[in-house]
Image (tube, grey):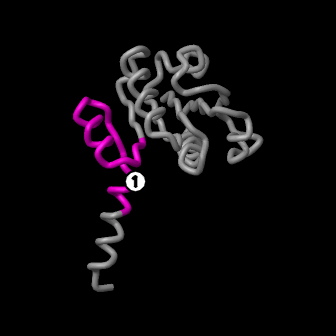
Amino acid sequence: MRYVVIGCGKVGSRLALNLVDDGHEVAVVAGNVDAFRRLPSDFAGSLVVGSGVDEDVLERAGTRGADALAAVSEDDNLNIMAAELGRSKFGVRNVVARVYDIELAEFYAGQGIRTVCPTVTLVSRVRDALESES
């Protein structure tokens, strides 16, 4: 499968590595070349420098025809816009946006953009740990 990952921070780089290790074709988009330092020099995917909301950058990353796009940069708005562009402009059916802001995540999930909200996930996991008897 072909994946596009927007963002190359802790999450984006780890996601890209996991996908490549599973044998997938992966393109990583990041705003500057320094962001790619989290990836090994022999990374088997492609690296594209530019904004994840720039249509030319997304085209160079192979978004058209990609099986999935994960927008996991540190910027909620960029992630939402990249996911929507991937879905509406490039026809990617499986798009996911990481959104820290709970209300924003819920709003865009209601608009049909799948969101992952680390805030909600962490609160749930911490609460479960607090309430467990182990």
Q: Residue at x 45, y 34 (%)?
A: 79
* Magenta region includes residue 110: yes
Q: How many marks?
A: 1
Magenta residues (range):
98-122
Q: Residue furthest right?
A: 41
Q: Residue at x 37, y 47 (%)?
A: 101
Image vertical order of residue 44 relative to residue 40, above or below: above
Q: Quadrant of residue 56?
A: top right
Tell me where residue 75 appears, x and y as whole percent.
Answer: 50, 40
Q: Residue at x 28, y 80 (%)?
A: 132
Residue closer to the observer: 58 or 15: 58
Tell me where residue 28 appears, x and y as whole percent.
Answer: 60, 33
* Magenta region includes residue 84: no
Mark 1 lies on a secondary structure that is: helix
Find disc 1 in the rendering and name its residue.
118
Q: Residue at x 73, y 34 (%)?
A: 33
Instruction: Left or right? Give the position of 37 relative to 16.
Output: right
